[in-house]
Amino acid sequence: MMEAALLGEWPHLGYVGSRLDRGSLRRGEVAALLADPRARACLVAGESIVLKRRPGMADGPGAFEALFALEEAAALGGRTGEACLLGLDGAVPHFVLPLHAAALAVLAERPDLFVIDLRSIAVQELVSAEEIGQLATAKAMTAWHARRSFCSNCGERLVVAEAGWRRECPSCGAQHFPRTDPVVIMLTVDGDECLLGRSARFAPGMWSCLAGFVEPGETFEQAVRRETMEEAGIHTGAVRYLACQPWPFPMSVMIGMHAQALSRDITIDPNELEGARWFHRDEVALLLARTHPEGLTAPPRMAIAHHLIRAFVEGRDPPRG
């Protein structure tokens, strides 16, 4: 087994860094919170995030900020009437303001700003882990609002309530709340080998864990066994939880598991995977270190799949908390 030291220290898991008090008891005070001169906000338009360059820093990790003074964010086109409270940093309220696409195009031309997608921000660690965590909530919430304009009960246009954490129907009185979709992501293990798969949408050469949505009436463990069988034809037995990760694409949570293989013969579902194979622990270490002789790689360190694979290589669980 490759020594853990050769792979470096345990890296940061993306989207989990926010330590904001979500302020659920103060969501009815949105007008007062928006009037706070200390309030800050991020700007989101669909898949795009607006970042502010830090003066004097070359582009790269930590060279940007995601939070603007609320007044500045509004001046850039953020819609304060649709603000959603992310939480409180001490007593300072943090919001997300949605942007129109037209405003985004103008901001993309400014040299002091940088427009980029959230996945790239996390992979490149362009802002702090704390801000990446806040952006995960921000993106998920703006995606929910974009898809929840009308009441699914009666069709009436909904109004925003509770600082963006609820929508209400003025006609039938129905209340609508954000939902998070659970997704199991699992590494199936057989002794010193693990099962990795390739999807056509992956970057060239990248192999990763299998994953799938939890269906109604399933436990996480049952979902792991079903998805592994459906995608790769592998029977699994014992399932062990390791860690979880918010995944705002658009609004899921990834539940990371290790599963014990009960069979070896692979039969892939070509609608889900273009390939699956067993990798020895030492070869997987090369994927993580990006030194595999065939140019094969594992997911980047912001993804929970990286941590599940790394835990197998190093013979330990990822950190909790």
Image (tube, rainbow, N blue to C red):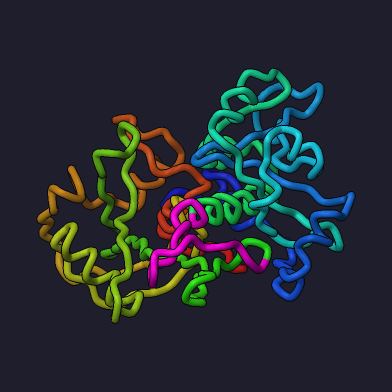
Residue nearest the observer in this picture, 11 or 88: 88
Q: Is residue 113 above or below residue 9?
A: above
Number of residue marks: 0
Question: Which image quadrant for residue 221?
Answer: bottom left
Instruction: Tell me the residue at 64%/52% (across/down).
Output: 82
Q: Residue furthest front?
A: 171
Residue nearest the observer in this picture, 196 or 17: 17
In the rendered structure, the answer to whether residue 70 lies left or right of residue 117 reads right
Q: Position of residue 89 (x, y in %)?
A: 80, 59
Which stretch did the figure color magenta? 144-162
In the rendered structure, the answer to whether residue 162 lies left or right of residue 169 reads right
Q: Is residue 7 above or below residue 253?
A: above
Q: Quadrant of the C terminus?
A: bottom right
Residue nearest the observer in this picture, 102 or 275: 102
Residue nearest the observer in this picture, 44 or 163: 163
Residue 160 in the magenta stretch? The answer is yes
Residue 155 in the magenta stretch? The answer is yes
Q: Residue furthest right?
A: 37
Question: Which image quadrant for residue 189?
Answer: bottom left
Q: Position of residue 170 (x, y in %)?
A: 54, 70
Instruction: Tell me the residue at 51%/66% (across/down).
Output: 178
Instruction: Tell me the residue at 71%/32% (across/down).
Output: 76
In the rendered structure, the answer to whether residue 168 lies left or right of residue 279 reads right
